[in-house]
Image (cartoon, rainbow, N blue to C red):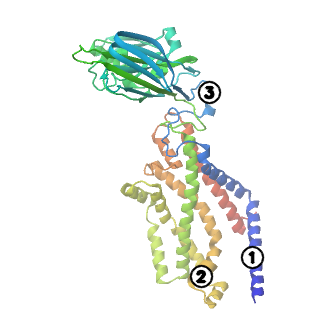
């Protein structure tokens, strides 16, 4: 008996294997299936390998280049690329001392300027290294300044100022000026000649809200400076030295329009350095700024200059300087993973509901399910997602949960009709005669008959779920943190991609959605041709 049962099991397994091989052979013969599968596999690989293909975060918080930087492969050679340079070694360019003041420099991994005594001192330091700038002038930069100004223990607190200056030596030698005519409130014009090649990035005195003293007192630390900087433009000496307050205010207002990096600092094939000017003041007889036995230590750790490139990476940057290629890769991952998951869950619900309603046809349960399907067909998906998002927060999983809960009705109705026809089949009657439970009959005998339809429906519903999420994002009610193609389209549309002709930002997610849909359509077409004899060629 056992031998007969074992032999029968082997025959069934052999037939199942033969059927699977035949089905696989039929599927692989279809060029449309192979093409569609290749597209889905390629998009899946992009998503899976995203952490390897890009070093940046999918949350789009990493600024990697200038705003609206074009793809590097599409940019001419003169377009600026990223330049990052750290200046840690400085030499004395000039030193002036009066009174009983001593100045010394120590180098122990970092430069430390020590000033002791009563009097006045001024030390100008210049970086030993420089940037040889090879492109047309860039428009954006970031300078990270790391230093510490502290008082030695037991010494008096001297007054001082630390100023960081970016210098283009070649432009200084040429003695070029940037000419500017300022319209005054009286209607007259004021001619201003701004020297090129030198720009004060930061100092401790003028950056205060209210400048009362000529020097600063207290400890100080590093900062970051973004260029262009309209506030820093108005704090340059050629502005603050204007005596007439009306003229000074008018100049400060209009000079904010000048991009100092592009028009005053950078020029092709020139050298750019960093200067540090430290001034010291300690006078026991000064009533307003008293100081006795003063001392000061200034530790220069590093000045990091990042000239932001206007050409970057595979797909450039967006309006915030984030890497578009990173967004595209993680958007591919979201489309594949979430699209297939949502379609699978929705169709599993369709299967269970359709099986129960079809097997229990004309019962109270069947009528209740049919009524529920009719009611849910009239629930608008997009407005419901908007309302839930405004009430409970815009979350990607909330959006997809609602899509799942509102996407099973059509499949359940079709499965119900199929089950009504299959429930009277011979093998179903035989299972009943053998005492099989209703649930066993539905899961073991009826559900496998519906598998081809479920696969086809999953293939066709996956793009629909992703497109619906993209529609929600385009309306502005999607998850603001989710790395999806829909979010990319939303940000590109509302943050000036069309205005700046940033085709590299708006086209990739649109093409990604189109290719994603084409891949599943090709697979669905191949499956339909295999299952439907009238479509076979």
Mark 2 sits on what residue?
440
Q: Residue at left 74%, top 79%?
A: 12
Disc 1, SS: helix
Q: Could you tell which of marks 1 and 3 lies nearer the N-terminus?
A: 1
Label 2: which secondary element: helix
- Residues under labels 1 and 3: Cα distance? 63 Å
Q: Is residue 391 left or right of residue 316?
A: left
Q: Is residue 423 left or right of residue 406?
A: right
| Residue at the farthest front position | 154
Callout in the foreground (1, 3) = 1
Residue drawn 53% across the image and 68% down it: 410
Q: Residue at x 76, y 60 (%)?
A: 29
Can you tell which mark lies on residue 13?
1
* Residue 211 visible in rendering: yes
Disc nearer the start of the sequence (3/2)? 3
Left or right: where does residue 428 sit relative to residue 5? left
What residue is shown with label 3? 76
Where is residue 193 drawn, in percent x and y?
Answer: 41, 11
Labels 2 and 1: the sequence-earlier one:
1
Q: Residue at x 51, y 51 (%)?
A: 470
Identify the secondary structure beneath mark 3: loop
Spatial separation of the CA atoms under disc 3 and disc 2: 68 Å
Q: Quadrant of the C terminus?
A: bottom right
């Amino acid at each position: 008996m056992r031998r007969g049962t074992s032999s029968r099991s082997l025959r069934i397994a052999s037939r199942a294997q033969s059927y699977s091989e035949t089905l696989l052979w039929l599927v692989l013969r279809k060029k449309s299936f192979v093409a569609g599968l290749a597209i889905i596999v390629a998009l899946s690989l992009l998503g899976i390998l995203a952490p390897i293909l890009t070093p940046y975060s999918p949350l789009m918080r990493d600024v990697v280049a200038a705003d609206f930087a074009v793809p590097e492969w599409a940019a001419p050679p003169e377009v600026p690329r990223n330049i990052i340079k750290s200046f840690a070694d400085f030499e004395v360019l000039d030193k002036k001392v009066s009174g009983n003041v001593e100045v010394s420099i120590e180098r122990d991994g970092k430069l430390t300027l020590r000033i002791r005594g009563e009097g006045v001192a001024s030390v100008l330091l210049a970086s030993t290294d420089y940037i040889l700038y090879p492109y047309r002038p860039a428009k954006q930069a970031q300078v990270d300044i790391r230093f510490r100004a502290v008082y030695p223990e037991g010494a008096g607190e001297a007054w001082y100022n630390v100023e960081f200056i970016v210098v283009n030596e070649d432009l200084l030698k040429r003695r070029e000026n940037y000419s500017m005519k300022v319209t005054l409130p009286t209607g007259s014009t004021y001619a201003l000649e701004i020297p090129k090649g030198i720009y004060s990035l930061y100092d401790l005195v003028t950056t205060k809200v209210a400048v009362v003293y000529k020097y600063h007192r207290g400890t100080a630390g590093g900062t970051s400076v973004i260029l262009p900087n309209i506030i820093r433009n108005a704090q340059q000496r050629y502005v603050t030295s204007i005596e007439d307050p009306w003229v000074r205010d008018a100049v400060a207002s209009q000079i904010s329009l000048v991009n100092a990096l592009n028009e005053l600092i950078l020029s092709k094939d020139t050298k750019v350095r960093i200067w540090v000017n430290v001034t010291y003041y300690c006078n026991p007889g000064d009533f307003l700024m008293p100081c006795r036995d003063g001392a000061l230590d200034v530790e220069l750790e590093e000045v990091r200059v990042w000239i932001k490139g206007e050409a970057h990476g595979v797909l450039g940057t967006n309006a915030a300087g984030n890497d578009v290629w990173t967004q595209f890769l993680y958007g591919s991952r979201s489309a594949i993973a979430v699209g297939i998951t949502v379609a699978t869950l929705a169709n599993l619900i369709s299967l269970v509901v359709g099986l129960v309603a079809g097997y229990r046809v004309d019962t109270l349960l069947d009528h209740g399910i049919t009524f529920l399907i009719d009611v849910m067909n009239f629930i608008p998906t997009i407005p419901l997602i908007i309302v839930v998002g405004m009430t409970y927060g815009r979350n990607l999983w909330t959006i997809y949960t609602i899509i799942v809960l509102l996407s099973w009705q059509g499949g359940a109705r079709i499965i119900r009709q199929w089950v009504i026809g299959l429930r009277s089949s011979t093998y179903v009657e035989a299972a009943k005669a053998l005492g099989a439970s209703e649930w066993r009959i539905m899961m073991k005998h009826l559900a496998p008959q519906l598998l081809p339809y479920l696969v086809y429906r999953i293939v066709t519903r996956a793009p629909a779920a992703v497109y619906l999420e993209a529609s929600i994002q385009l309306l502005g009610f999607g998850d603001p943190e989710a790395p999806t193609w829909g979010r990319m389209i939303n940000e590109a549309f509302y943050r000036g991609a069309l205005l700046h002709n940033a085709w590299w930002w708006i086209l990739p997610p649109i093409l990604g959605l189109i290719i994603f849909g084409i891949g599943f359509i090709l697979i669905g077409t191949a499956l339909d041709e295999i299952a439907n004899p009238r479509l076979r060629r």
